[in-house]
């Protein structure tokens, strides 16, 4: 395997790990959002501060703790989509390029399969 192939493998594997780490954080935020809905309004900000480990969170004027958490979830979704597109394009480049031997393309197929599995998994509902 060429050094270019090894470097690209490591880059794409690191990217896939980042996608899954972001997903884990997003799932934690969804769980927090569910718990916030059960708390009285005055206790919600302290729950967000406790979860984030950051006392003294300042929310923009008119924003509730639930809206703050929802915004954090949306930001993570945008990052996931962008990073997934980068990984997909890089994998497709390796697969379609004549620069790589057939044996060096297996990991690119694996990355694409991982991304497909990631995006087709069931989405947790907010109401449960």
Image (spheres, rainbow, N blue to C red):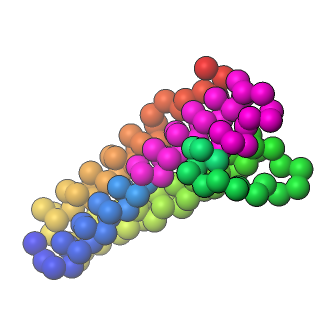
Decide which of 101, 72 is in the foreground and name it.
72
Quadrant holding the C terminus? top right
In the displayed structure, does residue 95 sit left or right of residue 89? Answer: left
Residue 89, horizontal then vertical, whole percent: 42, 65
Residue 110, horizontal then vertical, whole percent: 27, 51
Residue 22, horizontal then vertical, whole percent: 48, 52
In this rendering, does residue 70 appear at all?
no
In the displayed structure, does residue 48 sit left or right of residue 95? Answer: right
Q: Is residue 71 inside the magenta stretch? A: no
Q: Is residue 45 inside the magenta stretch? A: yes
| Residue furthest out toward the right | 62
Residue 6, above or below 61: below
Decide which of 58, 3 is in the foreground and name it.
58
In the displayed structure, does residue 121 sit left or right of residue 40? Answer: left
In this rendering, does residue 66 appear at all?
yes
| Residue furthest out toward the top | 128
In the displayed structure, does residue 102 sit left or right of residue 74? Answer: left
Which residue is found at the position 88% from the left and 55% from the top?
61
Q: Number of labelled discs?
A: 0
Bounds of the magenta segment: 20-48
Decide which of 2, 101 is in the foreground and name it.
2
Which residue is found at the position 21% from the left and 79% from the top?
4
Q: In which quarter of the image is residue 45?
A: top right
Which residue is found at the position 24% from the left and 66% from the top?
9
């Amino acid at each position: 395997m060429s050094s270019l192939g090894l470097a690209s493998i490591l880059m794409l594997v690191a990217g896939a790990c980042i996608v899954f780490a972001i997903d884990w954080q997003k799932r934690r935020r969804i769980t927090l959002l569910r718990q916030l809905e059960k708390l009285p309004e005055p206790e919600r900000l302290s729950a967000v501060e406790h979860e984030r480990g950051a006392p003294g969170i300042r929310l923009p004027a008119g924003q509730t703790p639930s809206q703050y958490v929802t915004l954090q979830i949306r930001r993570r979704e945008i990052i996931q989509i962008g990073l997934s597109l980068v990984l997909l394009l890089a994998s497709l480049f390796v697969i379609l390029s004549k620069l790589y031997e057939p044996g060096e393309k297996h990991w690119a197929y694996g990355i694409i399969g991982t991304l497909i599995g990631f995006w087709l998994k069931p989405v947790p509902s907010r109401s449960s």
